[in-house]
Image (spheres, rainbow, N blue to C red):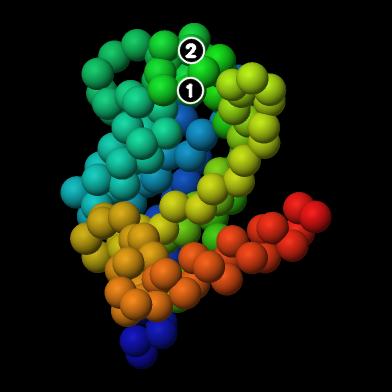
């Protein structure tokens, strides 16, 4: 019964493209009619964090990202997103894009949210405080090994 409820909850969360969608601006927007407060919290976090745009403030949400007036040096493009399969009450979105400072660099980021509250989930929420440092070290070693 519980797994049926969680599956049902996941099915009620839909993700579409934030408008205006173009070749260089494919960004996720969450729809969760069962809990509009959570929907709003997730969308606000994503757009403020990645686009430096406050939802509903008017204008093109991609303007700062595409005109170099934000924290990125030259430009920021978002090419795609995917909703990742997750355990109950978790929403995970992978976002693929490209940013440029001195040279272009592709990126793939994952953003995870608690569907009960809309809160962003980070490593400190998932692991004991002393474990986070160990996990970060393991990831850094793998990144260095992969880049060599």
Mark 1 highlights which residue? 72
Q: Find residue 14 and name its label.
A: none
Q: Residue 50 location, x and y as percent?
A: 42, 34
Distance between mark 2 and mark 1 Cα atoms: 6 Å
- Asked which secondary structure carries label 2, the reply is loop
Q: Residue 137 location, x and y as percent?
A: 53, 68
Q: Is residue 68 left or right of residue 43?
A: right
The front one of 100 and 5 is 100
Q: Are marks 2 and 1 in contact (CB under 8 Å)?
A: yes
- Asked which secondary structure carries label 1, the reply is loop
Q: Dot 2, crowdedness within 10 Å: few (<14), some or many (≥20)?
A: some
Q: Is residue 40 left or right of residue 17?
A: left
Q: Find residue 68 and name its label.
A: 2
- Residue at the far bottom in the pictured view: 1
The front one of 68 and 115 is 68
Residue plotted at (58% across, 65% down): 139
The front one of 107 and 95 is 107
- Residue at the far right in the pictured view: 148
Looking at the rendered image, the quarter that the C terminus falls into is bottom right
Q: Place residue 126 in its image quadrant.
A: bottom left
Q: Is residue 12 left or right of residue 26?
A: left
Residue plotted at (41% across, 58% down): 112
Above or below 63: residue 141: below
Residue plotted at (41% across, 82% down): 4
């Amino acid at each position: 019964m519980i797994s049926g409820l969680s599956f049902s909850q996941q099915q009620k969360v839909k993700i579409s493209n934030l408008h205006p969608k173009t070749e260089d601006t494919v960004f996720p927007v969450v729809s969760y009619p069962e809990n509009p407060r959570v929907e709003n919290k997730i969308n606000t976090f994503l757009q403020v964090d990645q686009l430096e745009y406050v939802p509903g403030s008017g204008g093109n949400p991609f303007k700062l990202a595409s005109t170099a007036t934000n924290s990125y040096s030259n430009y920021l493009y978002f090419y795609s997103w995917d909703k990742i399969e997750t355990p109950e009450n978790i929403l995970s979105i992978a976002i693929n894009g490209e940013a440029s400072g001195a040279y272009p660099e592709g990126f793939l980021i994952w953003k995870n949210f608690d569907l009960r509250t809309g809160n962003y989930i980070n490593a400190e929420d998932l692991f004991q405080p002393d474990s986070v440092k160990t996990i970060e070290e393991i990831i850094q070693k793998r990144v260095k090994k992969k880049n060599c």
